[in-house]
Image: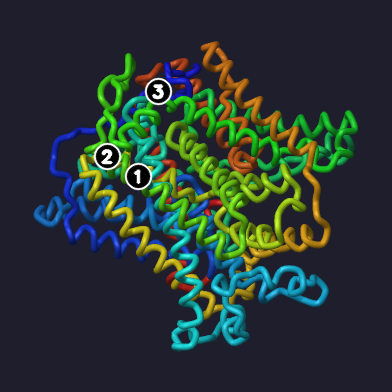
Amino acid sequence: MNQKSSSSFNTSPKSPLPPFSKGGKGGISTPVMLLGLALVFINCYWTTVVEIEWGSGDGSTLPLFVYPVFIIFVVALLNMALAKFVPKFAISQKELLVLYIMIVMSGTIVGESMFEGLFGSILHPIRYATEENEWRELFYRYIPKWFTVTEKSVLDGYYLGDSNLYEVKQLKLWLTPFLSWGSLTFVLVAVMLCMNVLLRKRWAEEEKLAFPIIQLPVAMTRESGRSFFKNKTMWIAFSIALAIDILNGLNYIYPAVPYLSVKLKNINVFTEKPWNAIGWTPISFYPFAIGLAFFLPLDLSFSCWFFYIFRKFENILGSIAGWRTLPRFPYFDEQGSGAWIGLCIIALWASRQHLKEVFRRAIGRESIPSSGGAGVGILEDSKEPMRYRTAVLGIISGALFLILFCSKAGMSVWAILLFFGIYFALHIAITRVRVELGTPQEIYFVNPERIMVRALGTRIFSPGDLTIMSYFYWFNRGYTCPPMANQMEGFRMGEISRTHPKRLLLAMVIAIIFSIIVSFWVNLHVRYKGGAEASVLNNKEFIGRESFAPLASWLLNPLKADIPGVLFMGIGLLFTFFLMAMRMRFFWWPFHPAGYALAVSYAMDYFWFAFLISWAIKSILLKRGGIATHRKAIPFFLGLILGDYVGGSIWAIIGPVIVGIQTYPIFM
């Protein structure tokens, strides 16, 4: 069954979630805001302790963050108890969702692709420079002093641990890097907020995209969670997933306990050519992944696993034909880069008329009523999180800040514009795929630095350009906790719960600022306590190696433009356009361009088999029982997600927080 709509990019059915109601005051009380900040603190601290101090999971790398779901699960249950016994202290769905949104905003700051990455690389070139790698001679003079700290006492305390962060000297030395990286982070996410304001009405109200990722938090908070938590089907699935986590968690501590394998297992048994070219081929049965994939349109879930297998056959074909002698054939990184840029172009092209009217409104001219479709009428921005003019001015102001920041750091203006142009284009594409299709978006090896170096070579860039781009690698590695996508989902949850959009925006901004402060502090706190070179903590230092080892190579051996790489970027771009054109022309066409982009950029390596399972189940349900049976099954798959997340969170509390040991992670 191929799910499509009249939208040129929308392939999802209309969202089953309730539409935005313009009624209600939608205010956010001060106690709720304070509770939200307390939960933000808990999430930042908990995430860092689990993922950095103990390496017991990567909950911040999943499209639906693990710990915010668990926190709102606990809050919703407590709220149900309050509603029954002390009703005046219970809070509404609107307030529960505001709490959840604030926690999620903190997840976009503290997670692996943001501050975890920053602290994996911020001191790396200073600490690991040696006579052999010649980093001091190659690029030390291009590192801005306000980016990092060079004092030996600070380095020793940070890397060896058992040191006091709270000495005045230590805090003073860290103040400048905090202000530098904190301000950059805030401007990046603020620009994304402004871009979301410009696109929100088109995607949420006119195209009515499905926003699959928000299904679980909305279900847990609707009617204060009463209908959801009374559903027997949900509890059956919840119990299955939780039982698996309990069993495997016990096995992690006591190996004599049986283990039920649901995590990555390599099935490649080939040792001879050409079949050994298939490479690492893992299968997994993650309950949460099977649950999440159920909410994808069938054509996308099919495309995700199909193009993953297609990718493997490209490797085999290359081995048979002898093309593997080409470096990096079949250039999946470059294919992925072209595909994601193509998805951005498609998304913006489909919204071109809306954006034209947005800019007319922003410059003070009356928008022109559309001639038909869902967007009929004068474009109104009074009920947006901010006026379109304010959003446009915010984007311009943010761009000016980025130019000034990077110019002062030593980067050329043209390189700044190209770098951040690609950066925001990738986030637009990720956000579009996320809010329409809800799939994981771990797109490693697709980032502005890699695209620019492949397309232009390194000779065209100054050493300062290359050094600063390498320092920016931490927020371009994988995009596993994308701020823009989570912000757009936050706006949608605000619509559903009738929250005043401007007050919701204020809550989001406050949560973001507070998260930047707390995340910076807690990363320093755990490293000064345990040492960044401790066996567990050291798992994020690889981000520093990935940032600066290529830089040294580029400076020692400058590269020319990679012509085959550029050609494969073009192939990825054109193939994405081809897939979309076929979808628009033929209803029966089963392939989705987002599935291709995800498969060739490694997002599907962990999940392809779980997606295949979920696709098969959903296909059978729709074919045999129709949409009614499909809807009845929804609580079961929500229960799989919730049970798996609760199980993983319980182990993340027992081990890292209470006992102080590494425990079973539900992912990886």
Q: Position of residue 373 (x, y in %)?
A: 33, 16
> Badge 3, how many Cα within 10 Å: few under 14, some, many 20+?
some
Q: Which residue is mark 1?
A: 391
**Residue at disc 1, secondary structure:** helix
Q: Earlier in the sequence, mark 1 or mark 3?
A: 3
Q: Amino acid at mark 1?
A: Ala
Q: Which mark is residue 646?
A: none
Mark 2, residue position? 384
- Going by the numbered disc 2, the residue's amino acid type is Glu
Element at label 3: loop
Q: Disc 1 and disc 3: Cα gap in Å?
A: 30 Å
Please, what secondary structure does the residue beneath circle 2 have?
Answer: loop
Q: Residue at x 75, y 71 (%)?
A: 135
Alpha-carbon neighbours of circle 1 within 10 Å: few (<14), some, or many (≥20)? many
Total of numbered circles in the picture?
3
Residue 227 placement (x, y as % from top left): 24, 38
Q: CA distance from mark 3 to mark 2?
A: 25 Å
Q: Is residue 525 visible?
A: no
Residue 325 seen in this snapshot: yes
Between marks 1 and 2 in the image, the one whose residue lies nearer the viewer = 1
Name the residue at 42% across, 48% down: 396
Give above or below for 323 relative to 173: above
Image check: 528 left or right of 498? right
**Residue at 43%, 71% in the rendered image:** 658
Mark positioned earlier in the residue sequence (1 or 2): 2
Estimate the spatial distance between the alpha carbons at disc 1 and disc 2, rounded to whole Å. 10 Å
Identify the residue at image location x=21%, y=40%: 498
Report the disc number at residue 13.
Answer: 3
Q: Sequence-wise, which precedes: disc 3 or disc 2?
A: 3
Instruction: Look at the numbered discs 1 and 2 and tell me whether their residues touch, using CB distance below 8 Å.
Output: yes
Left or right: where 374 falls relative to 449: left
- Residue 178 in the image: state x and y as whole percent: 47, 71
